[in-house]
Amino acid sequence: MTETRLPGAPSAAELFLRFTQVGASGFGGVMPWARRMLVEERRWLSDEEFSEALSLCQVLPGPNIVNMAVCVGTRFRGARGAIAAFSGLLCLPFAIILVLGALFTQYGELPAISAAFRGISAAAAGLIVAMGLKMAASRRLRSPMAVFALAAFVGIALVRLPLGVFLLAAAPASVAAAAWRAR
Amino acid sequence: MSEALAQLAIDFSLLSLFAFGGVITVLPEMHRNVVEVHGWMSGAEFAQLFALAQASPGPNILVVSLIGWKVAGLAGAAVATAAVCAPSSVLTYAVSRVWQRFRGARWRNVVEDGLVPVTVGLMLAGGYLITLAADHSVLAFVITAATAGTVLTTTRIHPLWLLAAGGLLGLAGWV
């Protein structure tokens, strides 16, 4: 079994504290802050270890950054570490967003606020479009495998298939195709 | 009320396990559940909550907290957030204990090569649907396109500036 107590490994309290900072510092993407904390400031992970952990967190379902907290916590302090890093990451942002939500409900009807939010919503949508296009330019899509990206877009955005149904068919097919190509 | 809580718990824990590539890939499914299936809010409200989550510090998964909160108050927020995080976190906990052993294993790459294209398609679908939900005027579409264009062509600009620019144009009454 993986050794959970490495020499010089951060304590659960330290994990909680550092992930609290990470969670509260990132706007529109926390992963770069996690990398800065883990690799550059604390040196809990090497560059390569971070990349490996990241690819694991991307392969697994769920929010990548939450997976990263669980993964790092587990690595140093087992289940306690995972819980510490996880709650550190989420507690403060959760409280902040609920306050913002309450303010928004209170004042969101004001014409100025709702007008501003029409603009903010449009810009927020643009951020997501850009993220998708950036990923679409990735090396892994310069191959016939891109047909699975197209299928996902058509199936989900245009045909509006339920995600579960689509994934149960498409994910095995796509992985099988990747395996066949890698023969 | 407790029915809504149960529904939130079921919906979001399933989403947790389907969210390959992060929360944005399940945005279309969230929209389908929340707006189309349950009718908890309008598409525009959904887009606003999403924008609020983007403008707030922390992981953007927290849009789920806002949805839960809108549906069933504080309990809804807690249930939805726990539901969307717990199943995937338990899985990550289990896998990260053994993953080191498969370092450099060929099937690891195969799984990644297979999942990435699907993830990208889902991401694009999310962008498409949130754009349709958020934009109700020509200028709104222009803002969306300009924001995306800026992110794609500029190396380092903080997303908050772009959200603020959109907000100012909105305040000016143009959107």
Image (tube, coloured by chain):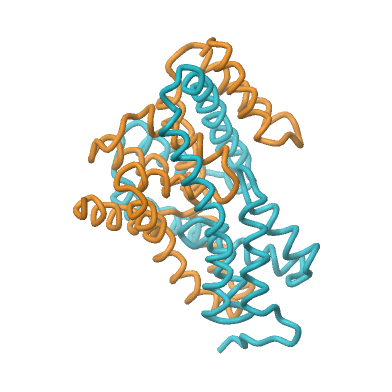
Q: Nearer the viewer, residue A121 or A13?
A: A13
Q: Would you identify the image quadrant in which residue B14 lies?
A: bottom left
Q: Would you identify the image quadrant in which residue B161 lies?
A: top right
Q: Determine whether B155 is above or below B172 in the image.
A: below
Q: Would you identify the image quadrant in which residue A158 lies?
A: top left
Q: Determine whether A147 is above or below B59 in the image.
A: above
Q: Position of residue A181 (x, y in %)?
A: 53, 56
Residue lying at 74% horizontally and 30% vertically, measured from the top left: B154
Q: Nearer the viewer, residue B34 or A178?
A: B34
Report the quarter where the C terminus of chain A lies.
Answer: bottom right
- Residue A183 visible to an observer of this rendering: no
Q: Position of residue A18 (x, y in %)?
A: 68, 65
Residue lying at 63% horizontally and 44% vertically, measured from the top left: A27
Q: Position of residue B141 (x, y in %)?
A: 51, 18
Farthest residue in the left direction?
A: B3
Q: Nearer the viewer, residue A21 or B108?
A: A21
Residue lying at 35% horizontally and 48% vertically, measured from the top left: B68
- Chain identifier matching the orange colour in the rendered picture: B
Q: Name the side, left or right, on which A34 lies relative to B29.
A: right
Q: Name the side, left or right, on which A29 lies relative to B22.
A: right
Q: Position of residue B12 (x, y in %)?
A: 34, 54
- Residue B61 visible to an observer of this rendering: yes
- Chain identifier matching the cyan colour in the rendered picture: A
Q: Determine whether A96 is above or below A105 in the image.
A: below
Q: Determine whether A153 is above or below B2 in the image.
A: above
Residue lying at 29% horizontally and 42% vertically, measured from the top left: B33
